[in-house]
Amino acid sequence: MTNMLNTHFTPIDQQNWSRRDYFYYFTKMMPTGFTVTVTLDISATLTWVKANNLKFNAVYLYLVSRLLTSHSEFRIGRVDDQLVTYDVVHPSYTVIHADHSIANLWTAYDQNFQKFYAAYLADQQQYGQLPGPMPKTPLSANLFTIGSLPWLDFTSYTPLPFTPLQSFLPVFQAGKFTTNTDQRTMMPLSMTVHHAVADGYHVSTFLNELQTVFDQPESYLD
């Protein structure tokens, strides 16, 4: 079972684009990406997940994907040398096997959480136990990387590409849940972006909004 894969995009008029000069600078003169790591309070979302007997990882993937639909700077890709803005981006995430090997899956984003959740479970059932790094073949370029390291409470996480940066979509990595003295459950989350499409302001705005989303999950999930 899969929901419809939205691959629609709008071409960017680079000549009149507000980030034209910044894009040139951060891709040609000084290619740069950067990572920001924050600690998010996920207490309200965990409570909602447990009350509804759902899987946190699916909720995490959905909430990040949904918020990205409100931030065009994080949905920029390239199609045949043309910069474009995708309508949506779909989460590409890691599953961990019993022997600690990993596989990369993706699930098509759908604004309807129940449809997304059903598709997520179907992907887990069909592909989750298959060996190899990518048992489900990618069907589109508008997949963004989002994962978790559930064993580690980190304060910094930075992906290190060994080739020049070619992707403009963000990369997310969550860490181990911890409980603080106020009995709040906290989760580290890193967000890595290409500086050609976004600045610190954009990342800060997104992460602050994501905390609001985690504080009010019922507004997005019911």
Image (cartoon, rainbow, N blue to C red):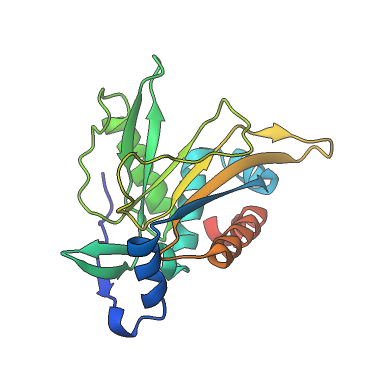
Question: Relative to 114, is 148 above or below?
Answer: above
Q: Quadrant of residue 222?
A: bottom right
Q: Residue at x 51, y 46 (%)?
A: 60
Question: Relative to 188, is 169 above or below?
Answer: below
In the rendered image, residue 36, in percent from the top left (x then y), is placed at 57, 50
Is 59 left or right of 89, judged from the image as shown?
Answer: right
Is 65 left or right of 119, judged from the image as shown?
Answer: right
Quarter of the figure that contains the N terminus: top left
Residue extending farthest to the right is 181
Is 74 left or right of 11, judged from the image as shown?
Answer: right
Name the foreground residue: 3 vs 33: 33
Q: Residue at x 42, y 39 (%)?
A: 160
Q: Count how many numbered circles sit on residues in the image.
A: 0
Q: Residue at x 34, y 62 (%)?
A: 27
In the rendered image, residue 16, in percent from the top left (x then y), is placed at 33, 85
Name the foreground residue: 109 vs 152: 152
In the rendered image, residue 129, in percent from the top left (x then y), is placed at 31, 24
Residue extending farthest to the top is 99
Residue extending farthest to the bottom is 16
In the rendered image, residue 62, in percent from the top left (x then y), is placed at 46, 51
Q: Is residue 39 visible to the viewer in this orientation of the structure?
A: yes
Q: Is residue 75 visible to the viewer in this orientation of the structure?
A: no
